[in-house]
């Protein structure tokens, strides 16, 4: 079986706050470590009322300090928001504090709107230099040359695995050209999944970091003791996507048994499109769904995300999934 990992947006639930979200994140990370999940990644978003992981490197440090063996990383850092040197220093610091456990996934999207980009003091055109910024950032992790004018301290000479994140052909092409592992955001933007996989695998160039293509795919997983209970948990994410598409992002809402009757045809079409890579059900149904997804995509690793309102039900979802998924060899 391919390994399973966790993507956590540190959800702020309706009626909750960021402090509670961070406690829930650490609790889930400790369970994920015990259950055998390979990685625990957090994502950078700004100005989102339902996402607490804006200061992503800080939250990674919080999770890594509270766990012992699981890899912890960014899925991802939105590099257009930052100077490459700053990210090299941040992740060099994390890698020095937690040797052999830190991953750095890099994305090209801003993770915010135009007003927030301006507040971050970055140009909206910063994304155009993403390939050059990735190369510059990786350069800071190489051993510093004598007399090198700019170096990352800490950072230089450290082993920090770098991933390219994406939801389009652009990221696939860049990951292939640089010989880097590729993580596709199929959990919310699956439209270009198969063309991106084909391009990445066909154009991949081996590098000192990676000898052959390696793909990790995002999947929404909602597991519960019964299919009906899982479907009910799923309504929180469905509501969140409807709110986002309508331009009204909000804290993660509780499940809603009346959601289906309130959805418009446009809502249903949007949910079907954006959340197509979702597996919802009792444990055996989840196992079959994940097996079918791996068979279709030939994924090397799956990154599961579960935007579940009740933190205990979220932990339970990961427990049930791990229980029906044999450990990777």
Image (cartoon, helix red, strand yellow):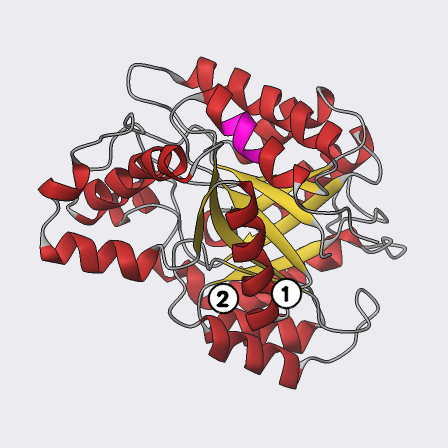
Q: Write the start and end of the magenta stretch as one range.
A: 314-318
Secondary structure of the residue carrying tag 1 is: loop
Q: Are marks 2 and 1 in contact (CB under 8 Å)?
A: no
Residue 8 location (% of width, % of height): 52, 36
Q: Residue at x 41, y 40 (%)?
A: 227
- Quadrant including the C terminus: bottom right
Q: Nearer the viewer, residue 276 or 291?
A: 291
- Quadrant including the N terminus: bottom right
Q: Residue at x 38, y 24 (%)?
A: 12
Secondary structure of the residue carrying tag 2 is: helix
- One can see residue 325 in this view: yes
71 relative to 176, above or below: above
Residue 217 location (% of width, % of height): 56, 59
In-image side of 293 versus 233 (left or right): right
Q: Residue at x 70, y 46 (%)?
A: 103
Q: Is residue 120 magenta?
A: no
Q: For mark 1, does the 10 Å Cα neighbourhood hold few (<14), some (14 to 19), or many (20 or more) residues?
A: some
Q: Nearer the viewer, residue 136 or 59?
A: 59
Residue 226 location (% of width, % of height): 44, 35
- One can see residue 76 in this view: no
In-image side of 216 versus 191 (left or right): right
Q: For mark 2, does the 10 Å Cα neighbourhood hold few (<14), some (14 to 19), or many (20 or more) residues?
A: few
Q: Quadrant of residue 208?
A: bottom right
State the residue position of label 1. 299
Furthest residue toward right: 146
Marks 2/1: CA distance?
29 Å
If you read the primary sequence from the N terminus, does the residue marked by circle 2 or circle 1 appear first?
2
Residue 50 location (% of width, % of height): 34, 30
State the residue position of label 2. 129
């Amino acid at each position: 079986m391919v390994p399973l990992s966790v993507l956590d947006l540190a959800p702020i639930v309706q009626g909750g706050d960021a402090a509670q979200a961070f406690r829930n994140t650490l609790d889930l990370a400790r369970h994920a470590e015990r259950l055998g999940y390979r990685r625990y990644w957090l994502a950078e978003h700004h100005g989102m009322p339902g996402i607490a992981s804006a200061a992503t490197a800080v939250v990674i440090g919080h999770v890594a300090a509270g766990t012992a063996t699981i890899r912890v990383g960014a899925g991802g850092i939105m590099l257009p928001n930052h100077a490459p040197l700053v990210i090299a220093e941040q992740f060099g610091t994390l890698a020095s504090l937690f040797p052999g456990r830190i991953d750095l996934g890099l994305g090209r999207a801003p993770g915010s709107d135009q007003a927030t980009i301006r507040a971050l003091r970055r140009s909206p055109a910063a994304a155009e230099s993403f390939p050059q910024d990735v190369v510059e950032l990786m350069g800071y992790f190489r051993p510093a040359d004598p007399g090198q004018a700019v170096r990352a301290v800490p950072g230089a000479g450290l082993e920090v695995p770098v991933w390219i994140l994406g939801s389009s052909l652009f990221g696939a092409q860049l990951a292939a050209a640089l010989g880097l592992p590729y993580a596709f955001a199929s959990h919310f933007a699956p439209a270009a999944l198969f063309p991106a996989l084909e391009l990445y695998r066909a154009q991949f160039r081996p590098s000192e970091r990676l000898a052959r293509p390696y793909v990790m795919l995002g999947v929404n997983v909602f597991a519960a003791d019964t299919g009906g209970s899982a479907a009910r948990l799923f309504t929180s994410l469905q509501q969140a996507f409807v709110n986002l598409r309508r331009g009204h992002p909000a804290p993660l809402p509780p499940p809603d048994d009346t959601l289906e009757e309130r959805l418009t045809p446009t809502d249903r079409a949007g949910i079907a499109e954006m959340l197509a890579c979702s597996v919802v059900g009792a444990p055996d149904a989840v196992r079959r769904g994940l097996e079918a997804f791996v068979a279709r995509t030939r994924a090397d690793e799956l990154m599961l995300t579960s935007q579940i309102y009740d933190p205990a039900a979220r932990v339970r979802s990961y427990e049930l999934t791990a229980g029906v998924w044999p450990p990777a060899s």
